[in-house]
Image (cartoon, grey):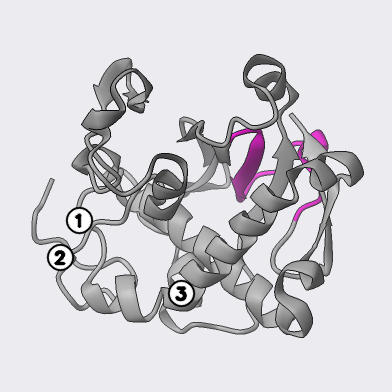
Amino acid sequence: MNDHRLCWICEENVADTSEHALKKSDIVRAYGKGSYHNLKGKQPIHFKNGKETKLQGANSDVIKNPKDLCKQCNNTLSQPYYRAYDKFIEYVLKNSELILERRFIDFEEIYGDDFPTQQTNLFKYFIKSFGCRIYANPDFNVPRDVISIIRNDLTHFSTGLKITISINNEVINNLGKDCFHFIGKTEMPYYNLGDCPNEFGFSFREHIGWFFINYYYLIDIEPRSGVEWIADRKVLFIGEI
């Protein structure tokens, strides 16, 4: 991998920072800030491509992408997105029983009167996560609509990326309702779009415990995975997978 790639957002500065493939704040929330060696039998294990690696800490290189962003785009530009995501996840963890019972999320309950702006920032966090996932694979280019939304910090936009949110009952049955230490991402299959040989569709999931965020780019969503969302709903109904 080229160590001097450009940041995929601005496409001008050298990519000199690495985005976490698994969000650092989620790892810290589950396992703390210090060395995980002291957790002994409870030390988290990272699984990828059939390989198991014990995490030494929340900043471990094993849960980072190759260098993909410049400091300006990864820090200053992205801070509102990170804050919106952290507030969203904190709400989910504190209200998990309510979410399981009623199967919807009301963004106004999370963000107050500013929910239109903040849910847009949350969606941009997911866009950024998607873009970094694509850029980590040298065989694909980050789609232009994704780059434009983040680079220009757009308020109104259209995109081929759709998000749904699901509850995974198999995870609940195997690990219980309080399994929020179980954090990960699925593999990312891709689909060649027949009419456009150089254009691809993608899908994958990421999760904290039984709470799954599902990404679909230029492909149809799975009907039971929830109502599709592109930062355009006050209330988001959740599916099951």
Q: Nearer the viewer, residue 104 or 176?
A: 176
Between marks 2 and 1, how big is the CA–CA gap?
6 Å
Question: Label 3, on which residue?
Answer: 150
Amino acid type of the residue tagged 3 in the rendering: Ile
Q: In the structure shown, which secondary structural element does the residue marked by tag 3 occupy?
A: helix
Kindly tell me whether residue 148 is visible in this rendering.
no
Decide which of tag 3 and tag 1 comes sooner along the chain: 1
Q: In the structure shown, which secondary structural element does the residue marked by tag 1 occupy?
A: loop
Residue 153 drawn at (x, y percent): 49, 82
Relative to 3, is 73 on the left or the right?
A: right
For the residues bearing labels 3 and 1, Cβ distance under 8 angstroms: no
For the residues bearing labels 2 and 1, Cβ distance under 8 angstroms: yes
Residue beneath the point at 55% across and 63% down: 85
Amino acid type of the residue tagged 1 in the rendering: Lys
**Residue reaching furthest to the right:** 102
Q: In the structure shown, which secondary structural element does the residue marked by tag 2 occupy?
A: loop
Relative to 234, is 24 on the left or the right?
A: left
Quarter holding residue 111: bottom right
* Range of residues picked out in magenta: 209-228
Between marks 3 and 1, how big is the CA–CA gap?
18 Å
Is 222 magenta? The answer is: yes
Relative to 147, is 89 on the left or the right?
A: right
Amino acid type of the residue tagged 2 in the rendering: Asp
Question: Label 2, on which residue?
Answer: 16
Between marks 2 and 3, how big is the CA–CA gap?
18 Å
